Image (cartoon, grey):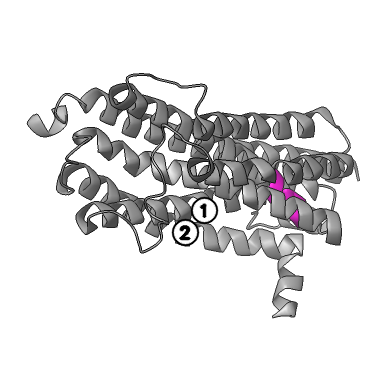
């Protein structure tokens, strides 16, 4: 428990590490989401074109 | 060598190569960060002046370093795109901007959280390092807003590349601000003449974090560039063939 309190600086230290984790995970999620969206949009457009031909 | 660079500039080649490389950057990145977090939080000794609050450097320093590195990647890629008209370079620049903004935001917020117990204030407007880092964040926002405001991709690439190149001046200011002016922010610790001014027990986790963040950034950047390439090449034959092939992407 003493380790986690970090000599009364725990709130500052843990909030920085927590925020970093959130931002990195968010960046990763955004990258995956955009990749899926772009791929799906192109797939729908190309398949629609194929069907028309 | 030239043949490799020539191939690398080809969007389909890069798209496939990036898919293979990205995981190989992510895995060592995560491993190094795991070691850095554990050693930085639990093994490194407490700083005699800052106490345990110094441990914030293990996320603050890599974020601040990446905030500048991402900008340099963005500006150099934009410059290459402007001079040699390599389309892939503009895709790299566009993909680097949101990541750079994220790490600049992290550097600012973690620095501010560290400043509260150490300096007694969350923010100091007169400090050149803090102010120039904030300007860096605004440059990223400006870059992304400019790209978003221009529908024509080629025009957006050119205009944003010019903005990125002009903004390099600010990156130089961010880096040297602690040497050029008196600053609340501490001076160079790692890139000091005569070697880093840190105990190895504190230094090694920090180096692991910097390297781990760099690998992770590389992996994220490659994935973003792939998406950017896919979007820009959406009307080309290779994308059509890839989508229609049974293996997909």
Instruction: Compute the Cα span from label 1 to label 2.
Output: 5 Å
Query: Which portion, as a residue range, is magenta?
Result: B88-94
Residue B145, horizontal then vertical, whole percent? 74, 28
Which callout, 1 or 2, points at the residue further toward the start of the chain? Answer: 2
* A39 over B207 or under it: above or below: above
Within the image, what quadrant is residue B174 found in?
Answer: top right
Q: Disc 1 is attached to a residue of which chain? A: B
Within the image, what quadrant is residue B159 found in?
Answer: top right
Mark 2 and mark 1 in contact (Cβ < 8 Å)?
Answer: yes
Q: Residue at x 28, y 55 (%)?
A: B203
Q: Give the structural element (helix, strand or loop) at label 1.
A: helix
Q: Nearer the viewer, residue B114 or B84?
A: B114
Q: Nearer the viewer, residue B204 or B91?
A: B204
Judging by the rendered image, the residue that carries numbered circle 1 is B219
Q: Give the structural element (helix, strand or loop) at label 2.
A: helix
Q: Residue furthest top?
A: B121
Residue B230, horizontal then vertical, whole percent? 73, 49
Q: Disc 2 is attached to a residue of which chain? A: B
Judging by the rendered image, the residue that carries numbered circle 2 is B25
Let me know if residue B90 is in the magenta part: yes
């Amino acid at each position: 428990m003493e380790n986690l309190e970090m000599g009364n600086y725990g709130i500052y230290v843990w909030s920085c590490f927590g925020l970093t984790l959130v931002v990195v995970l968010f960046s990763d999620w955004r990258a995956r989401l955009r990749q899926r969206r772009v791929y799906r949009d192109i797939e729908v457009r190309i398949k629609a074109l194929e069907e028309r031909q | 060598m030239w043949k490799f660079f020539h191939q690398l500039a080809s969007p389909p080649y890069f798209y496939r190569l990036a898919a293979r490389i990205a995981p190989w950057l992510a895995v060592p990145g995560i491993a190094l960060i795991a070691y850095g977090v554990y050693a930085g939080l639990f093994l490194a000794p407490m700083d005699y002046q800052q106490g345990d609050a110094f441990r914030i450097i293990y996320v603050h320093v890599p974020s601040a370093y990446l905030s500048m590195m991402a900008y340099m990647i963005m500006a150099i890629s934009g410059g290459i795109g402007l001079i040699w008209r390599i389309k892939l370079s503009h895709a790299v620049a566009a993909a680097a901007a949101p990541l750079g903004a994220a790490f600049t935001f992290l550097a600012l917020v973690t620095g501010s959280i560290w400043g509260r117990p150490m300096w007694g204030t969350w923010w100091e407007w007169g400090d050149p390092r803090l102010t120039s880092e904030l300007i860096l964040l605004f440059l990223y926002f400006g870059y992304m807003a400019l790209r978003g405001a221009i529908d024509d991709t080629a025009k957006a690439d050119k205009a944003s590349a010019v903005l990125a190149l002009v903004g390099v001046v600010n990156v130089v200011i961010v880096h040297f601000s602690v040497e050029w002016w008196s600053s609340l922010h501490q001076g160079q610790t790692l890139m000091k003449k005569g070697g880093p001014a840190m105990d190895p027990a504190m230094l090694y986790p920090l180096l692991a974090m910097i390297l781990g963040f760099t690998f992770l950034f590389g992996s994220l950047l490659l994935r973003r560039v792939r998406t950017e390439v896919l979007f820009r090449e959406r009307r080309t034959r290779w994308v059509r063939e890839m989508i229609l092939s049974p293996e997909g992407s």
